[in-house]
Amino acid sequence: MLRSLRPVVVVGVVLALAGCASPGVVAPTVTPAPGAGASPSATAAPSATGTAPPAVGGVDGSGGVDGSGEVVGEGVAPAAVSVPAIGLDAPLIDLGIADDGAMEVPVDADDVGWFTGGGRPGGRGPTVIAAHVDSASGPAVFARLDELVVGDRVDVTTVDGDVVGYAVTEVVDAPKAEFPTARVFGAQPTDQLRLITCGGVFDRGSGHYDQNRIVFAEPVA
């Protein structure tokens, strides 16, 4: 059912997420904002239209060359994420593109997912991890993401059992209509990490939050 985006430059995609959909802005050369939190009263999953991120690495997604001329590998798929500062330690599920063109998001408010069309730990480009901030029953797995500050540690365990450590470099609250798609999903010469959920004010009229919280992180030695 999942379709990998790694060999694709740009693919149209529709995002769907209860209570935390993307702003619906179509940008032909940039990427979608995968809204990642459910509203306290959400009962359905409204859709919004965006575009998919460009493939990372080489033309075939097999890696690339960083600014120093060093060949960077493809990386290894992540299996779990740990953020000690907020007491988070969770396995990761795959988030891809569904047959109907919708970007998959966690169905369960306690699931954390990684976008399989993006980067991988230890490779080139951003590994994007998203989860809900809350649900109809209360706080969800990313409820405390707003507590992270610069310097906090994030560890990602790969399917090979290796742990890749990252340090938070920036925390951004972005209006959904101004989601920094290029910064979040755009090609990077080095290993990067992004954590995304909803933030800001919940609008009960629209059933959405008005912002996304985005945590940027880079590898540590």
Image (spheres, rainbow, N blue to C red):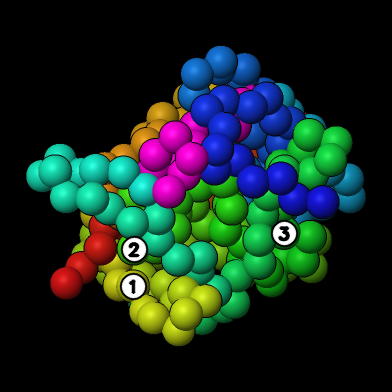
At a point 47% along the width and 44% down the height, the residue shown is 61
Q: Please state the extent of the stretch shown in magenta in the rendering.
A: 50-62
Residue indicated by mark 3: 106
Q: Nearer the viewer, mark 2 or mark 3?
A: 2
Residue indicated by mark 1: 164
Residue 82 shown left or right of residue 138 in the figure: left
Which residue is at the front of the view, 126 or 75? 75
Work out whether residue 103 can be spotted.
yes
Amino acid on which the number 1 mark rests in the picture: Val
Along the polypeptide, which appears first: circle 2 or circle 1?
2
Look at the image and say whether residue 69 sits in the magenta stretch.
no
Q: Secondary structure at mark 1?
A: strand
Q: Find the distance from the CA under tag 2 to the CA under tag 1.
A: 7 Å
Q: Position of residue 210 (x, y in %)?
A: 59, 35
Q: Find the distance from the CA under tag 3 to the CA under tag 1.
A: 23 Å
Check residue 122 in the rendering and tell me which mark sits there, or answer none. 2
As displayed, is residue 211 above or below residue 218?
A: above
Amino acid on which the number 3 mark rests in the picture: Pro
Q: Secondary structure at mark 3?
A: loop
Q: Position of residue 176 (x, y in %)?
A: 55, 31
Work out whether residue 19 can be spotted.
no
Contact? badges 2 and 3 (CB < 8 Å): no
Q: Nearer the viewer, mark 2 or mark 1?
A: 2
Residue 139 shown left or right of residue 161 in the figure: right
At a point 24% along the width and 43% down the height, the residue shown is 65
